[in-house]
Amino acid sequence: MTAEVYSNNVSFTYDHADEPAVINTMLSIPSGQCVVLCGASGCGKTTYSRIINGLIPQFFHGEFNGEQRTCGFDTAAESIDRLTPVVGSVFQNPKTQYFNAKVIDELAFPAENMGLEPEAINHRIVQTAQRFAIEPLLDRSIFHLSGGQKQRIALAAATMLHPKLLVLDEPTSNLDKVAIAEMRELIAQLKASGMTIVVAEHRLAWLNGIADRYVIFDNGRISHEYEASEFLALSPGCIAAMGLRTLDLQPYRQRIALLESQTNERELTASNMGDGSGSASMQHNLAQPSSSNSRPLLSTRHLSIGYRGRDGFSRTIPDLDFYSGQIIGLMGHNGCGKTTLVRTLTGLIKPVSGKVMLNGKPAKPRDLTRTGFLVMQDVNYQLFSDSVREELLLGLNETDPAIIERCNQVLEDLDLTQFVDRHPMSLSGGQKQRVAIGSALMCGKDLIILDEPTSGLDRYHMEQVGELLHQLAAQGKTVLVVTHDEELAAGWCTSIINLEHPYSKTE
């Protein structure tokens, strides 16, 4: 069996960095294997994936040493054009690899670049769309798809040229459990067809039974290599000690089901009180107010969300109440309206119809914007400053000693102190996520909404985010978390709304 990936003493240091991201890496991956790269955020697995697919040193500049051969090519010597037909890549942020506005054009793009005939291109589009079950999305704008749908399109486009090797960086970071199960099936099919697959991943449970080997990175070096049978036999304590996510999600799913059931019971109690507000539609009393006179910070009444246009949609949201001191998990499948809802709750999108109530009164979008802070799913949209410290202090009085002290504490709590002078856009995906969360902690607003806050985070930093959510709730903040992360939802949320059932309705 030939080696599709051969790394001999490979090291790389980015231009902006003092320390190497990958150090003296030696690894051989035979044809047809599925190998998982894992480890703490910033451990070097994303950098190594870029070395494999030739983006380093072709596009990411820095000092490269050693020998890297991928599918027989010397990646440092060959043009990236030679690697493109044989290596498919899906990045942590799929939007960074899009070149077209429409899905069908994005699928056609790789084949057009290689000069395939139109008939052959159309045939591949049909085959790929069927394989990935994306036929309904072909005429859609990529910009109007959910994060999970965008990830599926990126994976589909990466296979259009029938590559020998597929490199995936955090492919499930924005996917719900159904989409992850579908991703698992697709990866299994691709592996069965003979494709070599390298996955850099934090969420490990979905790869049970597919992965042949697990390679653990630590501070840029390979610290452990395991055959799948050895790795899956490790104790939960050993997995946790390495900073890795769980290998068994079943206990977490049971906890989520319990939280949903408790939320339903509180609903029914509220509806049976006969106050007139629960008879027209189900009302979600998701918090347990400190007294019978407590009033929710935010409510929705007869709300429909969405946007207009060719790819527009409208969705009815049942009446919801959000109280202070609660961590409310908002869950549901990709595309069910979670992100659109939280954008509406923060005034970034106007409701299609109905009302958002703030402290019992109808709120205008500007009122909601002043009250709430949204950490977006794609944090690249909200990083504006030249350094991490400046980002956290944006809009605040930098001469106030109390604000400076709070900023230093947030930096320490989020393990960002070493990056205070770095440009936010030079950080890894998980590090950027923590910077955006730091801005939320600094803002002082009453409503904090986080859209997939643990996307790209390892176990330690996921738990760290959970602790910060508890701190915000203890301060009396209303915390709403949009998440597919079952570990976060089970471990840290006090209530769960699932927009799929029985709460959501597509018009």
Image (tube, rainbow, N blue to C red):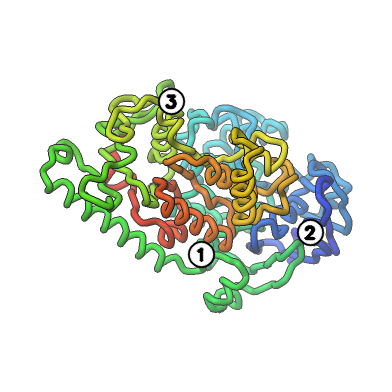
Q: State if disc 2 and disc 3 touch (CB < 8 Å).
A: no
| 460 or 498: nearer the viewer | 460
* Residue drawn at x 66%, y 42% as measured from the top left: 161
The answer to which of 3 and 302 lies nearer the viewer is 302
Which residue lies most toward the top here? 309
Q: Give the label on residue 205, or none.
A: 1
Q: Position of residue 337 (x, y in %)?
A: 39, 38
Amino acid type of the residue tagged 3 in the rendering: Arg
Q: Residue at x 42, y 41 (%)?
A: 447
Above or below, comparing residue 414 to residue 280 in the picture? below
Name which of mark 3 and mark 2 comes first in the sequence. Answer: 2
Specify the label residue 366 is tagged with.
Answer: 3
- Kindly state the secondary structure of the residue where label 1 is placed: helix
Where residue 166 sits in the image (x, y, percent)? 66, 52
Judge depth for marks 2 and 1 and give the one in front. 2
Q: Residues within 10 Å of mark 3 (few under 14, many from 20)?
A: few
Q: Secondary structure at mark 2?
A: strand
5 and 43: which one is in front? 43
Compute the Cα span from label 2 to label 1.
26 Å
> Hey, what amino acid is under mark 1?
Ala
Residue at mark 2: 22
Q: How far apart, in angstroms, are the residues tagged by discs 1 and 3?
A: 42 Å
Q: Amino acid at mark 2?
A: Val
**SS at circle 3:** helix
Residue 75 on image: x %, y %: 83, 50
- Residue at x 43%, y 48% (from the top left corner): 481
Among numbered discs 2 and 1, the one appearing first in the sequence: 2
Q: Quadrant of the C terminus?
A: top left
